[in-house]
Amino acid sequence: MEIGESVVQAVILHQVGNRLREESLVLADQCFAINDSISNVILSGYLRGIVSDKNQYILSHESDMALNDVAHHISGFFAKKISFVELSQKLASHLYASTHHPNISAGDLFIILFGKLKVDGVYGSAIGIFKSESKQQYLSASTDGNTQQLEVFSGINPDLIDKGALIVDGSEVIYAIDRLSSRTKYWIDDFLKAKQIPNEATKSAVATGLIEKVRENIESAVARQEFCREVIALCSDREKVLGEEIRGVSEKYISLDVWDTELERLIERKGLIDSGEISVSARSLQAKLKRIFNRINLGHEISLIVPDSFSLRDVNFKIDGKSIQVNVMVEKKNG
């Protein structure tokens, strides 16, 4: 998507409180007047700040996509069934109803209509939804004759998006961001009901998570290290590692269903759409795995950190009452 020629066509602001704390929802009924300065700040902050491959999602629903409120309201606007003000009020009301946790902060909700975004060479429109839950303090200096004065102002910084979404007319892919997702996850999960399109970072995280789970399911400490060696070897002298290659190595050590079960669990937990074929950077994966693999779980809640230059040869436990004697044999690689 190209946004270099984009324009701001309309902006409206609603105040959305937390209904569980009996805070109010204040709906505006008219848009702001927009000048070039305001438009430029919105375009350089909100629009450029959200359009990124790492922020790509797809709207979804548990049973029927037609029941996704955000998709339903926005498609109604683009079909000219409702006005922009009506759309913004419906989105604000839906966000208010999506507040299912008392810790969710109240905030200002901007609904913005963008025009002249280019997708596949065709100009189109998009709806931006941005909630600001934190305000910044700014210093303003002024001079009156020989007198200088500093004043403190509080305002919204468009370069620091708390929560945002951009839905482009006619495109299945949306853009979404939640800077404060560690506190509450309602923006992506409850309000948008969106699933992330896996990017390089998420694919790498899924691959690493799968490898760690496989390693946990290997009982022998020596076999675990052999598995680690084989996976690391996949990363040598190549740019990409495929999920099916890692799976092939894994199934030498574990039952066939562990990989599929864990992959499904990770996709669901991370809120991803079906990742299909996993393909990750060999260099990035190797760096992550070396940090993980140096720590070896010997069993009985005992772990050992083995430097890269050594490998585990054998482990024996002798348990006598409350004491455990561990004999560990390591060998230096390459003699």
Image (cartoon, rainbow, N blue to C red):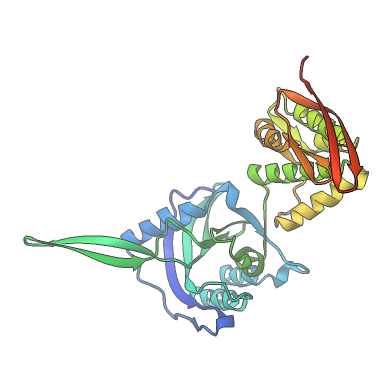
Image vertical order of residue 156 relative to residue 30, above or below: above
Query: Furthest residue to the top?
Result: 335
Q: List x then y, in percent, for residue 76.
A: 60, 72
Is residue 254 among what the camera can see? no
Image position of 207 (left or right of 324): left
- What residue is drawn where x is 50% and y is 84%? 24
Residue located farthest toward the left when viewing the structure as drawn: 146
| Residue at 65% over, 69% down | 190
Residue 178 point in image, percent of width and height: 56, 60
**Residue 153 visible in the displayed image:** yes
In this view, the residue in front, 208 or 222, is 222
Q: Nearer the viewer, residue 197 or 24?
A: 24
Quarter residue 223 falls in: top right
Relative horizontal placement of residue 15, taking residue 250 as reference (left or right) = left
Residue at the image point whose x is 30% and y is 67% from the top = 153
Judge from the rendering whether residue 153 lies leftward or rightward of residue 323; answer left or right. left
Position of residue 5 measured from the top left corner of the image (x, y, whole percent): 43, 51
Residue drawn at x 75%, y 29% is 232
Write down the quadrant of residue 329 in the picture: top right
Q: Which quadrant of the view contains residue 97?
A: bottom right
Residue 104, position as x, y percentages in the image = 56, 72
Q: Nearer the viewer, residue 150 or 162?
A: 150
Q: Is residue 54 above or below residue 158?
A: above
